[in-house]
Amino acid sequence: MAVPIVMPRLGDFMMEGTVAALTKSAGDPVAQGEVIAEIETEKVNYDLEATDGGVFHPVVEAGATVAVDGLIGYVLAEGEEPPETPAPAAARPTPEPRPTPAPRPSPTTQGDVVPSTPGARRVAAKLGVDLSQVTPSGPRGRIVETDVRAHVDGQQAAPIPAGLPSPSKSMPLEGIRKAIAEHMRGSISTTAQISYALEIDVTEAQRRRRELSKDSDVSVTLGHVLMKAAAEALKRVPTINTVLSNGNVLYFDEANIGFAVALDDGLIVPVVRDVGGKNICRVSAEAAELASKARDGRLLPDEVLGGTFTISILGIVDTFTPILNRGQSAILGVGRSVEKPMVKDGTVVVREMMSVSLTADHQVVDGAVAAAFLRRFQQMVERPAQLFK
C-alpha cells in the first residue's frame, strides 16, 4: 500500500516549506528512518525521514514549495504503481521571471557573496533577481526566500487607498508575517479569550537570581525565574496546563513552557520541556541556548513544538494582553519591572514591582481558575526560596 510523504508542520506559524533537496531518486529503495529529503523553512531546516521502508516515488522536484500536509511523494511496495495524484495541487507554481532594474553599486557584491539562504538563491535564480537589490530580513542579515518574492512583488504597482500620500515602500504581507497574521486571526476566531492582570513584587526574586548568577556559570534572568514559577503554579492549577484539540481538553503533568523570542521579521516560540522537573540553573541554560539558536536560525523542529503554556515578556511596557497560541488554554504576558513606593507592614517602602497579564480561553478556563493560577504564581515569585532549591 502506498504510504504518502507529506510536508511536516515544523512550527506554530509554518504554512509551507521548501523541498531543498531530495536525497533519494525515484525508484531508489529506502529504509524506515532513512533521510529522503531536506526541508527548509523560514526558521527551521529539517531532515525528513521515511516512516516506512519501500521504493521512493517523489511527486515534486527539489526546490518546490509545498503547503503543510501537502504531498511530497510516496513510499511504495516493490512493484506497486503510485496513485494518481494532481501534483500541481501540492506545489505552489513559481512566477514567470520578470525583468529587474540594473543593479546599483553595493559593497556586499564587491568580491563577496550576498548572505542568503539556499532557498533564496534558488528563487532569485529562477526569477532573475539580483540579490544585492533585495532587503534582508533573516537571521544575521541573511536574505530568505520571502525577501526575494517580496522584492519581485514590490516591483508591481499596488493600489493606494484614496487620500493617502504616496508610500515610501510597499511590501506584501507574506512569509512569517503572513503566517503570524493568520495564526493570530485563527486564535481569536476559535477561542473565547479573556485577560486577567495582577501586580507582583519581584524584589526578592531579583535579589536571589542575581546572587545565583554570581555563584554559577549560568546567567539567570528574571524571565527564567518566571518560567520556573509558572511551572510550579501549573502543578497546583492543572486546568491551565491544557490544550484544546478536536473538542477534547488534554491535561498534562509535564509543563512544556514556550517563550516568545523576537526576530527581525517576526517572532518564534522555542519550548523548554518539563520545566517543573528541572532546577532553575538548568532551565536558564536551556532557555538561553534556545534563544541563541532562534536568533541564529538554528532551531530544530522539536525545539518549537509541544508547548503546553507560553510566556511572552515585553520589558519596555507596563502591561499588555497577549493572544493565545492556538490550542493552548493560557498565555502569560509580562511587562517591565520598576521600583515603586509600596505600603508594607504599615510603612512606605520602595519595592520592585511588575505587572503580569494572563490571557485564557474561557471555553476551558473559568475566571476563578485563572485567578487561582495568578495567585499561586504571585506566591511563588514573591516567596521564591522554593524556586532556587
Image (cartoon, rainbow, N blue to C red):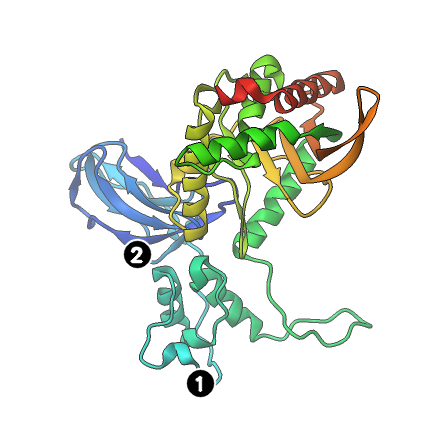
Q: Is residue 367 visible?
A: yes
Q: In this view of the protein, which residue sits in the foreground, 98 or 2?
A: 98
For the point 53% across and 66% down, which residue is it?
150
Image position, residue 28 (x, y; %): 16, 45
Mark 1 is surrounded, within 10 Å at the Cα level, by few (under 14), some (14 to 19) or many (20 or more) other residues, namely few
What is the distance, in whole Å, between disc 2 and disc 1 at their CAs? 32 Å
Q: Amino acid at mark 1?
A: Pro
Q: Amino acid at mark 2?
A: Ala
Callout in the foreground (2, 1): 1
Image position, residue 348 (x, y; %): 82, 29
Q: In this view of the protein, which residue sits in the foreground, 62 or 90?
A: 62
- In the shown orientation, is residue 241 left or right of residue 125? right
For the point 33% across and 45% down, which residue is it?
46
* Residue at the spot of label 2: 62
Q: Is residue 221 above or below residue 361?
A: below
- Identify the secondary structure beneath mark 2: loop
Q: Is residue 354 above or below residue 182?
A: above
Earlier-in-chain disc, 2 versus 1: 2
Q: Is residue 361 above or below residue 40?
A: above
- Identify the secondary structure beneath mark 1: loop
Mark 2 is surrounded, within 10 Å at the Cα level, by few (under 14), some (14 to 19) or many (20 or more) other residues, namely some
Which label number is shown at residue 105? 1
